[in-house]
Amino acid sequence: MSTDELVKGLAIGVLAGGAAVYLALNNSKRGPAASTAAAAAGDDGHAPAPGELGLGNTLPDTSPMWFSEGGHIPGQKGEGGEVGSMAIEEVLVDTHSPYQHIQFFRSKTYGNVLVLDGNCQVTEYDEFSYQEMMTHLALCSHPNPKRVLVVGGGDGGVVREALKHASVEEVVLCEIDQMVMDLSRIHLPGLSAGAFDHPKTTVFCGDGMEYMRKHEDYFDVIITDSSDPIGPAAALFEESYYVLMKKALKSNGLLCTQAESMWFAPDIIAEMLDFARGLFSQVEYAYTTIPTYPSGTIGFLLCSKDDGTKFKTPLRTVDEAMGSNAASLKYYSTPIHAASFVLPEFANKKFGSYC
């Protein structure tokens, strides 16, 4: 088999199968044409620039493995039509829990990476943009958040951020997969930064929906750190789940959930906005930038039971909400809170009746 044929086969495998780890080709295994092309291009083992790695291109020898993730949400933009890749230095974990396929690897650029069922969940390099925005958009919009529920988020990053708020007295983490938490402690220790063992933290390993059914009218803020709407996680994007969260919130409670990319999942977002508006007094969509997620952005759906909630204007500045803990922030700020709700025109037109 020629080099071009093998590279094409790998690319097709990515598009058909979602994401996976693939071995690159060494010079000794390349065909003559590929070796000649590499020499002509001055092949020095450099990492490929954006757009450089594609069908028929040679792969750098110094990075023998690649993780590639393609568009994978059925029926949405990007499905089977785009791939993003990270160079792997070492595979740390490749195992299965009762719930999912769990992989950790050390990447060349982004530090350690957690992958669930072939989809990148978090990297050490850019995790803060997601964790901080998901947490503080919600907590800084509540007048006095004391009880916080985090559904999913077994890496501990959202819990870490919630504990920065002086008003918070209790954070409950509901994560169904004990292996994700245990392995994240080992391979992503900076994400939780001791949050699992904090005296204000309660860890419940089990079904978050069942936990909420037993705690109605209890939480000030609920944050759902979910994966994409595929398989079991699809239920977390349905109206019935939002009804359950609403019942678990106090009368002035609010929530924030992972709400996909406006570039790749506009129809899913529009549907979520539609049913959320029928359940909650205030509903908004915000987003953050994050290079290792498809399209480089990810969105958040924020909903409040209190008609007086104004998500676009935080009630408290970072200093008021977090005191000295505000110094640890890397992405979130009071100005960026407001800016995150400013959508590009194509999104305004798509979501115009909602946002």
Image (spheres, rainbow, N blue to C red):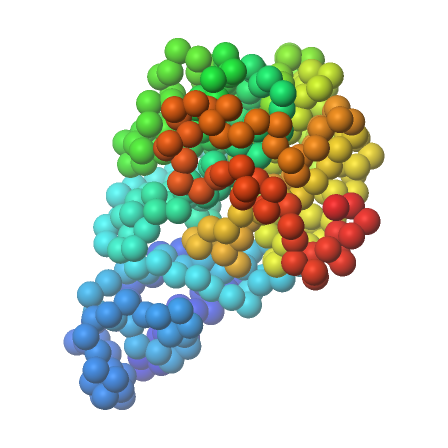
- Along the line of sight, which residue is nearer the eye, 172 or 29? 172
The single residue placed furthest to the left in the displayed view is 28
* Residue 42 is at least partly visible in this image: yes
Q: In this view, does 218 lie to the left or right of 155?
A: right
Q: Residue at x 58, y 63 (%)?
A: 78
Residue 192 point in image, percent of width and height: 37, 28
* Residue 177 is at least partly visible in this image: no
Q: In this view, does 141 lie above or below 262?
A: above
Residue 162 point in image, percent of width and height: 48, 25
Q: Quadrant of the N terminus?
A: bottom left
Residue 108 location, quadrant? bottom left
Residue 20 location, quadrant? bottom left
- Along the line of sight, which residue is nearer the eye, 151 or 231? 151
Q: Which residue is drawn at 76% across and 58% down?
A: 349
- Along the line of sight, which residue is nearer the eye, 252 or 102? 252
- Along the line of sight, which residue is nearer the eye, 135 or 23? 135
Residue 334 point in image, percent of width and height: 53, 37
Q: Residue at x 34, y 47 (%)?
A: 125
Q: Is residue 292 left or right of residue 152?
A: left
